[in-house]
Amino acid sequence: MNARFSSALIAVLLTALIARADVQDDLRASRRNAIVRAIEKVAPAVVTINVVEIQRERVGDPFFYDFWDRFGPRPMQRIREHAVQSIGSGSIFDAAGHILTNYHVLQDADAISSVTLPDGRNLEVRLVGYDERTDLAVLKAKGENLPYIPFGDSESLLVGEWVVAIGNPFGLIMRDPQPSVSVGVVSANHRRVSRDVGGGERLYQDLIQTDAAINPGNSGGPLVDVAGRAVGVNTMIFSMSGGSQGLGFAIPINRVKRVAEEIIRFGRRRNPWLGFHGQAVEDLSPYSLRELGITVSGGVLVTELLRDCPATRAGLRLGDVITEMNGVAVYQPVDVDLATWELFIDDQVTLLVDRQGERRRIVFKVKELTGQ
C-alpha cells in the first residue's frame, strides 16, 4: 500500500515538474518573439562610425589689442586647431564587407577615426564613394566572414507593420559599440520632404516615415523588418527639441540598392540628364498664357532645351507644357527635378505634354550628364 502511494506521489510530482518546464519553455518562446529574433540576427552587422573634423580658428592675446590699435598694426594671429569628434551608424550589407551609411555622417570629416563592430572589432575601411543628393555613402571594410544584413523590399512595406531602427544614438556619451534598438511601425510610405530641409544638393523624397525613435547618432543605421532584412537607411527626424518626437524618416532600401550598386561600380552616382528646364505655368501672367497658346491650367513650360539631348531627339519642343512625368503630375520645376533624381542611367522617361491644346506622349531614356 505504501509502495503504491509512493509511486502515485512520484508520478504526480513528475507531471507537475514537466508541466512547469513546459510553461517556462512557452514563456521563453514568447519572450523571443519575431522582433527579438530580428534584432539578434542583424545587430552584429551594425557598425559605429567615428569621424574627426579639424576646426581652425585665429587666436591672439586680447590684452595687447588696445596697445597695437594705438601704436601700430596688430601682429599676425596664430591659427589654433582642435579636433571635433562626431558619430554615426552604418551597416554591412554584403559578404564583401561593403558598408552603407549617410553621406552627411562623413560630409565634414577630415578623417574616419574608427569603424567598430558590436563585438569590439575595429575595421580598417576605405571610402568607395558617395551621392550627396540621395545622402548615401559606401565604405569598404577589410576582413573575412563579416556579418551582414540582407536587403528586403521597401515597396512591399505596409503602413502599420513593425520595424526596428538600429544605430548608435549619443554613442560618444555611451562609449559602447553595442547598438541601441527602437521599435515602431511604418507610419507612412512615399513621404516627400521640402527641398529646403536638405540644404544644398540634398533631395529628400519618397521616404519611409516611422515612429521608431531615431536620435542623433542613428543616422546611417538600418531600418529592418521583423524578418531581419534592411528596408531602409535611417536618415533624419523632424523635431522641435533635437530628440525623437516620433517623426523619423528612412531612405527606402530599393533606392539604396541602386545607388550602392552605382557607387560600387563607378565610384559615384552617375548624374541623370534630361536636357531641358522649365517654368511653372501657374506663375505666368494671363497675357503670356494667351500669347504662348497655353490652354492647360498647370504644368511646366519648357523654356530651355538643348539641341542634342534625349528629350529633343524624342520630340520635345520649346513651348511644350509638361503635365506628367512617369505617371506623376508636375506643377513646378522642382517636381521635375525630384522625379529626375529617382531615375538611373538608361531608365525610361514618359512625358505627357500639351502643345497648344494637342496632347502628346514623349518617351526616351535617361543619359548621363558628362563634362561637369
Image (tube, helix red, strand yellow):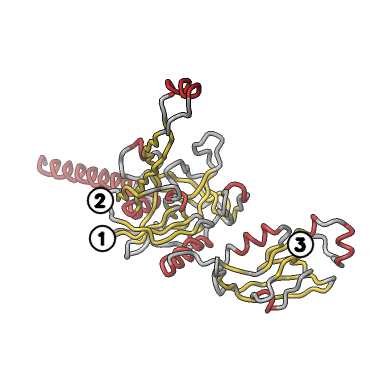
Residue type indicated by callout 1: Gly
Disc 1 and disc 2 in contact, CB within 8 angstroms:
yes
Q: Position of residue 238 (x, y in %)?
A: 56, 42
Q: Residue at x 13, y 41 (%)?
A: 6
Find numbered disc 1 in the image and state the secondary structure of the residue it sits on.
Answer: loop
Alpha-carbon span between mark 1 and mark 3: 52 Å
Q: In this view, does 335 lie above or below 69?
A: below
Residue type indicated by callout 3: Gly
Alpha-carbon span between mark 2 and mark 3: 54 Å
Q: Which residue is drawn at 58% across and 63% down?
A: 342
Left of 165 or right of it: where is 363? right
Q: Is residue 43 visible?
A: yes
Q: Which mark is residue 121?
A: 2
Q: Mark 1 points at which residue?
A: 143
Q: Which residue is drawn at 45% across and 41% down?
A: 216
Find numbered disc 2 in the image and state the secondary structure of the residue it sits on.
Answer: loop
Q: Is residue 362 above or below residue 78?
A: below
Find numbered disc 3 in the image and state the secondary structure of the residue it sits on.
Answer: loop
Q: Which mark is residue 231?
A: none
The C terminus: image quadrant: bottom right
Whichever of callouts 1 and 2 sits on the residue coming sooner in the sequence is 2
How many dots with numbers?
3
Whichever of callouts 1 and 3 sits on the residue coming sooner in the sequence is 1
Left of 46 or right of it: where is 183? right
Q: Which mark is residue 299?
A: 3
Disc 2 and disc 3 in contact, CB within 8 angstroms:
no
Quadrant assignment, res 366: bottom right
Alpha-carbon span between mark 1 and mark 2: 10 Å
